Each structure stands twice: as C-alpha cells, then as structure tokens.
Image (cartoon, rainbow, N blue to C red):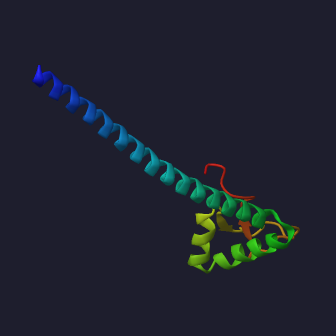
Amino acid sequence: MRLSLYVTVLASALSVGLGITVLIQNNANHRLQEDIQAQQRQLQKQQADLDRLAEGPPYGSVLREMAIRSIHNEKIRAVLAANGYTVQPAKPASDSSSPASPNAPNTSEGPDSSR
C-alpha cells in the first residue's frame, strides 16, 4: 500500500515538473520567435528600400552609374550581384545607326525573380 502511494506521488511530481519545463520552453521559444520576426521585418524593409532604390527615378541613375563602374570594380559588381543584379558589358553594335554606347553596360530590369 505504501509503495503505490510513493509511486503515485512520484508520478504526480514528475508530471508537475514536466509541465513547468514545457511552460519555460514555450516562453523561450516565444521570445526567439519574436526576435526572428523582428529580423524578418527588418529584412523586408531593406528589400523594399532596395526595390524602391532600383525603381525610383532619382535612384535609377545611381543604379546605372554603379553598373557602369562595376565593369572595372569587382567589389561593386559583387554588391550588385548580392542584390540580384547582373551586369554585362554591352557588345558593340554591328551597324553604326545604333545610338548605344559600347561602354554602357546592360543591366537587368531588377532583382532576379529566382530569388
């Protein structure tokens, strides 16, 4: 009779202990989830800023200038590539009626859609 009492008390104590452990872990997970969501919001804001930078009229010229400079500067090319832009030097036109400059690069319209 005494053995079953001890087993019951031990099982109850174990259940309470596990319940408290679950609550503590849940609280820690909730804080981690809030941190991750804050980071995600920050990244989304940065992406929106980059998109606006690429599309906006005053910033389009900056992006074009970066593309031109990236032909001779590997660091700028790496920054553009990290944000989804590829830069390839323009091929000289075969006929002289084309107004495109052979020094102007071809840039993609925006970040790669594969990202």
Instruction: Say above or below: 91 vs 15.
Output: below
Q: Position of residue 110 (x, y in %)?
A: 72, 58
Instruction: Say above or below: 24 vs 81.
Output: above
Instruction: Say above or below: 95 vs 3.
Output: below
Q: Is residue 64 shown left or right of residue 113? A: right
- The answer to which image quadrant residue 95 occupies is bottom right
Classify the position of the N terminus by image quarter.
top left
Name the residue at the top extreme.
1
The answer to whether one can see residue 107 in this image is: no
Q: Nearer the viewer, residue 73 or 7?
A: 7
The answer to whether one can see residue 86 in this image is: yes
Q: Nearer the viewer, residue 56 or 23?
A: 23
Q: Is residue 2 shown left or right of residue 55? A: left
Q: Position of residue 43 (x, y in %)?
A: 62, 60
- The answer to which image quadrant residue 81 occupies is bottom right
What residue is at 66 percent from the left and 50 percent from the top? 113
Q: Nearer the viewer, residue 88 or 36?
A: 36
Q: Position of residue 36 (x, y in %)?
A: 53, 55
- The answer to which image quadrant residue 100 occupies is bottom right
What residue is at 53 percent from the left and 57 percent from the top? 35
